[in-house]
Image (tube, rainbow, N blue to C red):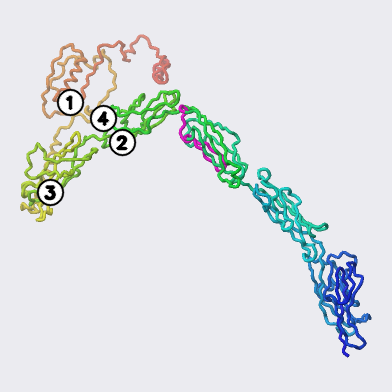
Amino acid sequence: MRTHHCLSLLIWTGLFYTVNTTPFEEESNSPLTSKRAVSLTKNEGKMLHRIKRGWMWNQFFLLEEYTGEDTQYVGKLHTDQDKGDGNLKYILTGDGAGSLFVIDEKTGDIHAAKKLDREEKSLYILRAKAIDRKTGRQVEPESEFIIKIHDINDNEPKFTRDLYTATVPEMSGVGTSVIQVTATDADDANYGNSAKVVYSILQGQPYFSVDPESGIIKTALPDMSRENREQYQVVIQAKDMGGQMGGLSGTTTVNITLTDVNNNPPRFPQSTYHFNSPESVPPGTHVGRIKASDPDMGTNAEMAYSIAEGDGADTFEVVTDKDTQEGIITVKKNLDFEKKMLYTLRVDASNTHLDPRFLHLGPFKDTAVVKISVEDIDEPPVFSKNPYLIEVDEDVKEGSIIGQVTAYDPDAMNNLIKYSVDRHTDMDRTFSIHSENGSIFTLKALDRESSPWHNITVTATEINNPKQSTPIPVFIRILDINDHAPEFAMYYDTFVCENAKPGQLIQTISVMDKDDPPRGHKFFFEPVPELPLNPNFTIVDNKDNTAGIMTRKDGYSRNKMSIYLLPILIFDNDYPIQSSTGTLTIRVCACDRHGHLQSCSAEALVLSAGLSTGALVAILLCVLILLVLVMLFAALKRQRKKEPLIISKDDVRDNIVTYNDEGGGEEDTQAFDIGTLRNPEAREDAKVRRDVMPETIFQIRRTVPLWENIDVQDFIHRRLKENDSDPSAPPYDSLATYAYEGNDSIANSLSSLESLTADCNQDYDYLSDWGPRFKKLADMYGGDDSDRD
């Protein structure tokens, strides 16, 4: 009879309930104290029957983190072939076999050699077989079984982050979600409550709360203000075992910041501000700054300043500085201390970004009073106009007053003012101004045609403080006066054909006028009334400031008259009427039958008279020879002309010869005979010029004889008059010298010739006291006798 063998597994477990078809005793949680065997038996030669197992034979359970002194018993492998004589050998292979799990080869008992951690590995798969030691034959087929590691609560919950950061708007309502924190537990969530985490708040109450299951942190107090407190630190705990006693826990920190909302209106730190400003500051000058405080931040604290009301709303303006959130008080118009010394403004500061949720906390603005005092300074003169425009006729006389400028001192002292013209703007000195009353008058004649505008600058200066001055431009427009007569607009090269018919237009003329009448130009053309009627041409006024020249007869002949001069009277219609006479030169020319010009030259005229080109050249050569002969005759005549006796150096017409000789005075009768001057009869009769040889004998006009004792000065004056009125005097300048020292001299003789006849030597030592300029004389005359010798 055939026998079937099977491997029986004897399993020892702890903390595990097994169920069989037959009643079994309940295993306790204590260490394994009993064992149950499943085996196959023989019934006295009868067929073997398998006993039905009451548990999963191929699965073992083992607690993790075993801390006992002995190795932890896992279970037992057993087969009914095992007679207990040690002939069978049990072999274990698979995960951890030999290192983590060891088996007793004889008995089949399995033990855990090391402490196991379910979080590292929760399942081990092993294979077991039994072999005969003697034959090495496998008595049981290899069977696979599993060892599962049972979890214990050995891991505390851990948060995903050690530090959380969150924000929530201030003034948020209760229950506003802030942030969710999450903690994980490495224990088995399917086995007991080891991985069931519950959240609680350890720090941060009563401001915040946390949902125990989801870990969502929420606000717990209403209307939390960032201005009161901005930062909060909340500590959250996560505990396993459903939060029961003995559970493990972990904590994390959450830093919560309240963000700003616009829930605070701006406020001025003071109700009144005072500023001072000189009256001379130009528009745009900053007077002062004001600033309202707003505890909010960023855009919620941005403000705009404006002038609500006040007596200076049109004189000042306020500008918002975006960087500093200040209101800048700025001058809008010129200030005048004499007109107003104090301004009062009401300035508003309001938020620009309002939050509708907090409008009930408003109004979001504040008002302050700004007082500005104007300081008096010494201001320059002020003109009544800026600029001045003066119009004057161009025929105004020199020295005429053409206009006046007025300026005044705006200060309370009202200093006197003087006026002057900036000569850099009137280089020609055409105008001047009365320094006291500002009247402008002309220094020269004006001409609109050369300078229609004059732009000068007049300066008003305080007499007591010349540094205070004000320039002003004065534009002087020169008005036109009809002082120019019309004249031809251009030179007209007019011709008339020899075959012209009466009434034929040969030229249209136009005129120009330098004047500029306000009603425009209107010119008239007429023949000159003083001249007889022109039989050759007619002047026709076209009534459009032009005139046509028409032929008056039938045919013209160059042989009889090659050029006609036609005077034309032109006058305008302005007052006073100006007129001029223009002469039009009309040449007679040869034309074809269509009136086209062919020739107007003299050569054509000669050719028409029958002269050939050779004859014309001969005539020109004869004329040239005659001109050469005339020039030679004139040159020979100049050579025969007598040369002057006196060289050009001594010619009194071109030179004055100076003789620096000191005469002997009136007592020196050898130098000049004064009697010659006193006796007019002593001069030679019919004297001629001594500087040239006379070509002809001039009739010398005899002067009236003078008496003996005539005064020499009167004599010189009469001689001068005679020379000026003498018609026979030469046409070039001549010099007649009459010297006279006078009747008498109170000084003695200055001649040094008589000094040698003195009885005693003179003392010239005083020359040394006269300075370096007389050193030479002092050396010559002031030395010792031995030096003079």
Q: In this rendered view, identify the residue nearer to me: 354 or 389.
A: 354
Q: Secondary structure at mark 3?
A: strand
Badge 1 vs badge 4, beta-carbon distance below 8 Å = no
- What secondary structure is marked by label 4? loop
Q: Which circle, 1 or 4, is nearer the viewer?
A: 4
- Of mark 2 and mark 1, the one earlier in the sequence is 2
Residue 250 visible (yes or no) = yes
Residue picked out by circle 2 = 453
Give the Cα separation between the discs numbered 4 and 2. 15 Å
Residue type at mark 4? Val
Label 1 and label 3: CA atoms lie apart by 68 Å
Does 319 lie within the magenta span? Answer: yes
Q: Which residue is mark 4?
A: 396
Tell me if residue 519 comes above or below residue 401 in the rendering. below
- Marks 3 and 4 sit apart, C-alpha to C-alpha, by 44 Å
Q: Which residue is mark 3?
A: 506
Q: Which of the two labelled residues, at mark 4 and mark 2, occupies the earlier sequence position?
A: 4
Magenta highlight on residue 368: no
Crowding at mark 3 (Cα within 10 Å: few <14, some 14-19, many 20+): some
Instruction: Measure the alpha-carbon separation of dots 2 and 1.
Output: 63 Å
Q: Residue at x 7, y 46 (%)?
A: 552
Disc on res. 690: 1
> Which disc is residue 498 wearing?
none
Q: Amino acid at mark 3?
A: Ile
Rendering coords of residue 144 (x, y %): 81, 77
Q: Badge 1: how crowded within 10 Å, few (<14), some, or many (20+)?
A: few
**First to last magenta residue range:** 314-339
Amino acid at the residue labelled 1: Arg
- The three-letter code of the residue at mark 2 reads Trp
Q: Mark 3 touching mark 4, by CB under 8 A? A: no
Which mark sits nearer the N-terminus, 1 or 3? 3
